[in-house]
Structures are given as C-alpha cells and as structure tokens.
C-alpha cells in the first residue's frame, strides 16, 4: 500500500499564515480535485477557524495562547476525527497548517512527537521566513495588538531568539531530514505567481489552475496607531489591572471603533519603517544565520535580505502621543456625542 504524503506547513509566524490558511480552506474542493486534502470539515475539533492549531497543540503538548478552551486537553477528540477523515479520503496528499507547529517554544522533542505520530506518512515540512527588519517591526506590532505597553527599542528587539531562523529550521531538519524541509522567503519577488498561496501550491507540486486568492489579512498598522494602541493598553491596564485579557482587548477595540467613526484617527496609513542604516545593521547581524537558513537552496542570504538604499528615515516613534493627548481625544469624542 502506497503511503500518503503529508505536507506540514509550520509557519513561521508573521509570514501570512492566516491568509494562506484562508485560501486553502476556501479552495478545499478545488484542491481535492487535484488529489490534495485540506481537512476542514465543519464542527470538528481539529480545526479552529481555517487552521489546524488544535492538532499542533495536541501533538506538541505545548500551550498555545490563541487556542480556544473547547479544543484544549482533548487529544482523542482532536486527532481521531482528523485521522478518520484522512483515511476515508482518496487524496494522496494531505496538508496541515498552523504556525503553532513552528512556534518559538517548539524544540526537537516536540518535532519528534510529530514525526513519530505521522510515521506512516511521507512527511514534507514547509516554512516561510521573513527578512528580519520586516519581521522585527511586524512582531512588535503584534505584541502591541495583544496588549504590550513596551515602547519600540531596536537594540532590544534584534537579539530575540525568534529572529534566528536557522536555529528554528534546524530543529525540523534534524528530525525529518534536510531533504524533507523546504524553506521559502516571505517575499513576493520569490513567489510563484507573485502570491503566497500560489507559491505554496506550487511548492507541493500542484498547478494553480482554478484556484482563487482570498483577500489579504493582517496588513501593517499606521505607526501613529501603534503608538495610540500602546498608550491605550497602558491606560486600560492601569484602570483595569485584574480584568481578563479578552475584556481589555474588547474595550480597546470599542474605543478605536468610536474614534474611527468620528474620524479622529489617521486617514492615510504611514507604516512603521526603519532607516537605511538601521536596516543595514540588522542585515549584517543576521547574514551568517540567513546563509545557514537557506543552506541547500538556490537562494543566498544577500538575495533574501538585500541592501536597502531607499533613503527612508526611522519611522518607529510617535512621541507626540501622551496622556494629555489621549484625554483630549476623549473630550472631543464626548463633545461630538453630546452635540
């Protein structure tokens, strides 16, 4: 009996995983006609939204902060319907996707658990990596979205372990074998059809005929919005220190929606950016690591993370926002509501 092939998309984070998963889910019938199963039955415990984070959490045993409680701690309830669905399908290729597979706290021990569980499959692993200057800014914005109050500091951001992709990739190469791990740049210029979804489909050996892209997700924030959200996080934490994280998030979202409705937020997006000199500092710092990351591929570190000479300035700080300014926005909003 021919073993089925399992393609494991492990992220990494901040590389368009939500968009890719939405596309895979949306195109599941078309992919099935090409012999590719993206398990996405309705009302099953192995799928949360469009991704397989319950599977990643069950197999690794690691906590995942965005995993819903109803999926937590039920290994059989997650894995049994998944394996039954795979066994009953005629598709010879199965795709599972979650950035929780390639999370920062995943070690060789967890990767081995995944390898052992899927020992009856021919497993291929695919990871996308993002050049570190973009990754650092995107990761910081995600921290702000999830409640951080820290101001941006480049020096503190550079040496975080999630930026060293070679170490994260090597875990999977050591367990599954280097020939079974594909590393792709999160960069449109490298993508088949200049689209992440089309590139992924191409990497697993299928054509893109009849497949449709989904709307893009998780676009970068305006740098002034990042500062505003950080200050709101601080004020909400100060006033409601014991409130659950989800409640704080809802409160912040309500405030931002009210400000947007009254047109008190920036109308034109100016994304966070680093100066050319800051980018070059990061490029040189990670050059050797990037060489190791793309070892065995046709992509060099300098192609992945090329020099930038755009003349951009450091656009990461917005010091004008302070407590007085925030109170002023609240007063203006109150005046509009009362008028």
Image: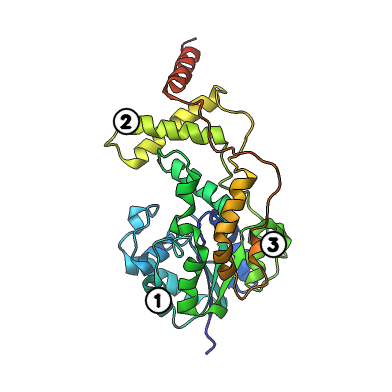
Q: Provide the residue designation for mark 3.
A: 190
Q: Provide the residue designation for mark 2.
A: 238
Task: Relative to 75, say whether 271 is above or below.
Answer: above
Q: Residue at x 44, y 82 (%)?
A: 119
Q: Secondary structure at mark 3?
A: helix
Colour mode of the rendering: rainbow
Q: Residue at x 42, y 43 (%)?
A: 146
**Badge 2 density bin: few <14, some 14–19, many ≥20, Cα 10 Å:** few
Q: Residue at the left extreme?
A: 242
Measured Cα–Cα span from mark 1 to mark 2: 43 Å
138 vs 146, left or right, is right
Q: Residue at x 47, y 67 (%)?
A: 167
Q: Position of residue 103 (x, y in %)?
A: 44, 61
Q: Is residue 20 visible?
A: no
Task: Relative to 218, say whether 116 is above or below.
Answer: below
Q: Earlier in the sequence, mark 1 or mark 2?
A: 1
Q: Position of residue 256 (x, y in %)?
A: 48, 30
Q: Position of residue 130 (x, y in %)?
A: 58, 57
Quick one: 286 or 178, which is closer to the camera?
Answer: 286
In the drawing, what numbered circle is on residue 112? 1
30 vs 80, left or right, is right
Quick one: 167 or 81, which is closer to the camera?
Answer: 167
Measured Cα–Cα span from mark 2 to mark 3: 45 Å
Q: Quadrant of residue 31?
A: bottom right
**Badge 1 density bin: few <14, some 14–19, many ≥20, Cα 10 Å:** some
Q: Earlier in the sequence, mark 1 or mark 3?
A: 1
Q: Earlier in the sequence, mark 2 or mark 3?
A: 3
The reply to whether callout 1 and callout 3 are in contact (CB within 8 Å) is no
């Amino acid at each position: 009996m021919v073993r089925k092939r399992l393609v494991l998309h492990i992220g990494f984070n901040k590389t368009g995983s939500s968009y890719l998963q939405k596309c895979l889910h949306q195109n599941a019938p078309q992919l099935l006609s090409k012999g590719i199963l993206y398990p996405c039955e309705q009302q099953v415990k192995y799928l949360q939204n469009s991704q397989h984070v319950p599977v990643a959490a069950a197999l690794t045993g690691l906590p995942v902060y965005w995993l819903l409680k109803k999926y937590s701690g039920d290994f059989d309830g997650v894995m049994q319907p998944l394996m039954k669905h795979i066994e009953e399908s005629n598709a010879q290729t199965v795709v599972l996707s979650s950035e929780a597979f390639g999370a920062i706290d995943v070690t060789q021990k967890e990767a081995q658990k995944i390898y052992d569980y899927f020992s009856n499959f021919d497993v291929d692993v695919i990871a996308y990596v993002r050049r570190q200057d973009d990754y650092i800014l995107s990761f910081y914005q995600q921290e702000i979205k999830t409640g951080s109050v820290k101001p941006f500091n480049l020096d503190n951001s550079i040496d975080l372990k999630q930026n060293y992709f070679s170490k994260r990739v090597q875990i999977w190469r050591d367990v599954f074998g280097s020939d079974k791990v594909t590393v792709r740049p999160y960069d449109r210029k490298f993508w088949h059809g200049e689209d992440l979804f089309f590139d992924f489909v191409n990497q697993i050996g299928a054509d893109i005929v009849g497949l449709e892209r989904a709307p893009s997700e998780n676009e970068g924030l305006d740098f002034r919005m990042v500062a505003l959200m950080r200050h709101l996080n601080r004020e909400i934490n100060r006033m409601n220190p014991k409130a659950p994280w989800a409640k704080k998030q809802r409160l912040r979202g309500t405030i931002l929606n009210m400000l947007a409705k009254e047109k008190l937020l920036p109308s034109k997006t100016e994304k966070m950016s680093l100066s050319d000199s800051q980018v070059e500092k990061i490029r040189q710092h990670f050059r050797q690591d990037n060489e190791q990351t793309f070892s065995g591929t046709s992509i060099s570190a300098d192609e992945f993370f090329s020099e930038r000479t755009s003349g951009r300035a450091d656009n990461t700080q917005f010091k004008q926002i302070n407590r007085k300014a925030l109170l002023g926005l609240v007063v203006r909003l109150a005046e509009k509501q009362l008028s």
